[in-house]
Structure formats: C-alpha cells, structure tokens
Image (cartoon, helix red, strand yellow):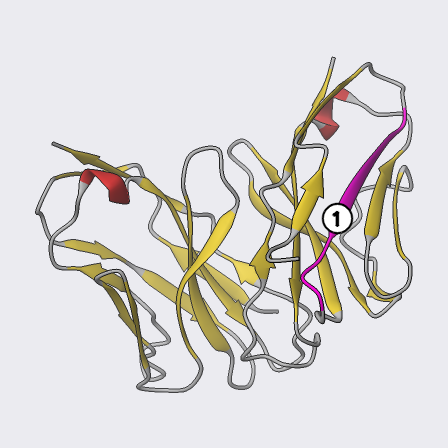
Amino acid sequence: GDSVTQMEGPVTLSEEAFLTINCTYTATGYPSLFWYVQYPGEGLQLLLKATKADDKGSNKGFEATYRKETTSFHLEKGSVQVSDSAVYFCALRGGGADGLTFGKGTHLIIQP
Amino acid sequence: GAGVSQSPSNKVTEKGKDVELRCDPISGHTALYWYRQSLGQGLEFLIYFQGNSAPDKSGLPSDRFSAERTGGSVSTLTIQRTQQEDSAVYLCASSFGSQQAHSPLHFGNGTRLTVT
C-alpha cells in the first residue's frame, strides 16, 4: 500500500538557518503530494501541494518539488524564523483518493 | 461555514462512559474524514464518508467505535465504553469528493479526549 517516510525530529535550528525536511513516498499510480503544518494546540493546516511530477509547491517561503524519479518531496526554506516552530507532515493522496497517507511528522524547533 | 468545526474542543470522561464527537465540514465538501492523533503515534486514519456512506471502515480500532453522517453534512464519531487508550486528539477533515486526488483535506482543530 501507499506509504510516506519523513525524517523524525526533533530538528533544532537557529533562526535564519536553511531548512530541509526530507520526505519520500511509495505509491501506485500518480499521487498528489502535500505538506501540512501543525502549530502547537492547533489542527493541521495545508502548507503547500504539488499534483504532478516536477511541480513546485510554495507558500510562506517554503518550497517543495515533486520528484518522481526519486519519489521525493523534500521541504525547504531558505531562512527560518522562530514562528516556523511546529510539526510538519508530509502526505500523499493516491488515485483511489480515500484520503491522505501521512508521514509520522517532523517536530521543528527554531531557536532565536 | 468558513472552516471545519469540531466540538467539543476538549472532553474529559470517565472510563466506561460513552462519548460523542461532532464534526461540521466545510459547506459543499462531500467527503469527510476522521483521524486520530496520539502522542508518539502520528496520524491514524479511522473512517471516511462520501456523502452519507462510509465505504471504508477498516481503520476503526474496535467495535466500540462507530460513526455516522446525516444529510451529507455533520458527522458524529461515537466511542462506547471508553478506555484509557482512547485518549487522543480526534481530527476531522473534509474535501471536495473522495475521488479528487488533487483536492487537499481541510482539517478542524480537533477534539482532545481524555479518559480518566
């Protein structure tokens, strides 16, 4: 079945550092890929998405590119802020579209 | 409404009691999903509805869990005879049509259930 693997945290960085959170997936067909963010005490918010190979999703300075050849969708940001501290989930939605398959989440901590 | 609404936001119950969790999806969204988020366990899929029907109930952890959706809108997740291991955050999400793979899920803020 479908699965998503992402680096487990916590990942601790200093403010203005470069961020990469790795995500790889296994799926049949051509899934859509998503990154969600969960701030403390809140629900999941869609951060960005990509629906086909080589698409780049971007939002709030975050970017991720759908790489079919490496089955990856790594999340990047050039300069992180303390307010980016949250849990980040990589997810896919397959052709059968029964919902999202999530990775386990990466807890990101940004220190001033 | 503007977003997915879940109630209550917090629920504390005694072991053995029944609880009902409510989800009000975004207007026009035909698909509705329930997930459970436990500490250290990530996000666990429970059940989804397309309209009022639930094609996939395989994620429900036991027969103490049930869910229904009426009028293609509000959904209720019921847990009977609650156990301490049921303590978790229960998240509801909705989207346009379960067959639309490009459509993201929109989540509510969840119900935090604590079983004492």
- Dot 1 lies on which element? strand
> Foreground: A3 or B65?
B65
Residue behind mark 1: B23
Q: For residue A96, say whether it is visible.
A: yes
- State which quadrant residue A23 falls in: bottom left
- State which quadrant residue A47 falls in: bottom left
Q: What is the magenta range?
A: B18-27
Q: At 84% from the left edge and 25% from the top edge, which residue is drawn?
A: B82
Residue B8 x %, y %: 72, 32
Residue B111 x %, y %: 67, 35
Q: Is residue B106 left or right of residue B35?
A: left
**Circle count:** 1
Residue A88 x %, y %: 38, 50
> Foreground: B8 or B65?
B8
Q: Is residue A94 left or right of residue B22?
A: left
Q: Quadrant of the C terminus of chain A?
A: top left
Residue B91 x %, y %: 64, 45
> A6 above or below A9?
below
Q: At 56% from the left edge and 62% from the top edge, which residue is drawn?
A: A101
Q: As shown in the figure, which amino acid type bears the numbered disc 1? A: Cys
A75 magenta-colored: no
Q: Is residue A74 left or right of residue A49?
A: left
> B94 above or below B11?
below
Taking the view exactly as shown, the residue that stands out farthest to the left is A16
> B116 above or below A56?
above
- State which quadrant residue A71 falls in: bottom left
Q: At 51% from the left edge and 34% from the top edge, which residue is drawn?
A: B40
